Image (cartoon, rainbow, N blue to C red):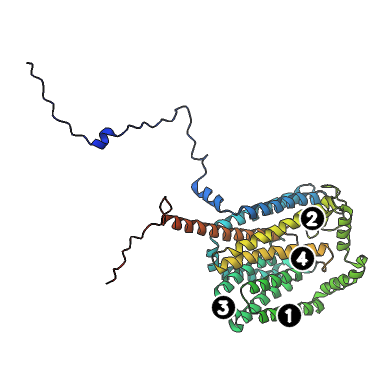
Amino acid sequence: MTDQPITPPQFVDDDAAYAPTVTLPRRKSSAAPRSEEARPSGRVRRLLATVDVYMSIIIGALLAFGLIMVFSTTFDLSRELEGSETAFFLRHVRNATIGLTALTILMIIDYRLLRRFAVWVLLFAIGSLIGVLFFGDNTFGARRALINGSYQPGEFAQVAIVIYLAAWMGSKKAKIRSVAFGLLPFIVLVGIIAGLIMLQPDLSTAVIVLAVATMMYFLAGANILHLVGVTALGVGAAVAVILAQPFSYAQTRVDTFISSVGDLTQADYQVQQAVNAFRIGGISGVGLGQSEQKFGALPAAHTDFILAIVGEELGIIGVTVIVILYIALVIRGLQIARRAVDPFGALLAAGMTLLVATQALLNIAVMAAVVPSTGVPLPFISFGGSSLVSLLMGVGLILSVSRVTALQGVSERRVTSANYDRGGRHRRSRVSRPRSR
């Protein structure tokens, strides 16, 4: 019998011995891996996932409409003044780019951080309004701009007052209904801002500040009697200002408007030409770029009266599309305000939405000869720098409120889902309860 070597016993794990062997498929070497630069980062994806799509589409549509109409209304004027058909248009593109950059930055930043700087924002606005009275560019007897007309403090002051009022009234809560902590500080604060704007003089911007501030005061829960008193005080102050000698131009506009109620031929010259542009355009318009009113008959057609050129070239259909976009913006903005996580965000989003709505409504009312002529541009469409940038900053804050609300909802859903297992059963708490004796 042949001796065989003795093999020691092998001890193996039963699970390991019978565990199936899984071979993962290897990636083909021919396929080149995607570069890190081609992949969007997780932070960018999270940012895009929380951006309010509806508000972004509305603002994008209004800006695109504005770019088209600014070029249509300025190519001839730009050729005469600048020697290039695109000079004015490129300035508007630059302003829109600056505004969109500010919008993006403010959208990314948590708006709640802005509450700490609300006082400084207001002080900067007040300082700018005082500085423009002494160092502003004198144009047609008014001082409304600094730095060769590139910065109008009145436009920024509208945004600043909304930010401060949202922070102030959001923290007062029930105290906003008192006289000492609510009514009197509100009158003093808004009176200072509106008064400095009137001294430029710029009555239309001052009226917008008063109107938006009063509506925010109402939304914050003000006493109805106080609100009625503030409204009466504002109307009385407006009448006194119109009758004052330094503001005789406002009285002339009011008298002209009263005369035009019964006879449109007595209206302001620009209003007559705007109404004539709507009449020429009819339902469908004469065609994009085919307006005749912009060639001198309607002065400054690219600024305050650009809606009249829209009516002439695109007709009532084009004007209706713009009005629908503004209505959609107001609805979406108020929805964002209603869903905000705190009073500051709610008042901030509502105030910025009302600011855009008030400007648009006032401009459209002037085009329809419903109110006296004012110098209010059409938001996001009229040619301008400070107005466009300031309003896009306001939209950035609205989008920030929307983002914070969306992130808050994601966090709450994660906490809720963590309390349930895969079968939908509620997980028992690991905290032991004391037994009853």
SS category of the residue bearing label 1? helix
Q: Residues within 10 Å of mark 4 (few under 14, many from 20)?
A: many
Discs 3, 2 touching: Cβ within 8 Å: no
SS category of the residue bearing label 3? helix
Q: Position of residue 341 (x, y in %)?
A: 54, 64
Compute the Cα span from label 3 to label 2: 43 Å
Instruction: Identify which amino acid the numbered label 4 is placed on.
Output: Leu
Residue 174's label in the rendered image is 3
Residue 319's label in the rendered image is 2
Q: Nearer the viewer, residue 113 or 124?
A: 113
Instruction: Identify which amino acid the numbered label 3 is placed on.
Output: Ala
Labels 3 and 4: the sequence-earlier one: 3
Labels 4 and 1: the sequence-earlier one: 1
Q: Which residue is mark 4?
A: 362
SS category of the residue bearing label 4? helix
Q: Residue furthest bottom?
A: 180
Residue 232's label in the rendered image is 1
Q: Residues within 10 Å of mark 3 (few under 14, many from 20)?
A: some
From where the camera sits, is residue 150 visible? Answer: no
**Number of numbered discs visible in the structure rendering:** 4
Left or right side of 253 for 10:
left
Compute the Cα span from label 3 to label 1: 23 Å
Q: Residue furthest left?
A: 1
Q: Residue furthest top?
A: 1
Where, by quadrant of the figure, is residue 15 drawn? Answer: top left
Instruction: Identify which amino acid the numbered label 2 is placed on.
Output: Val
Q: Position of residue 106 (x, y in %)?
A: 58, 58
Labels 3 and 2: the sequence-earlier one: 3
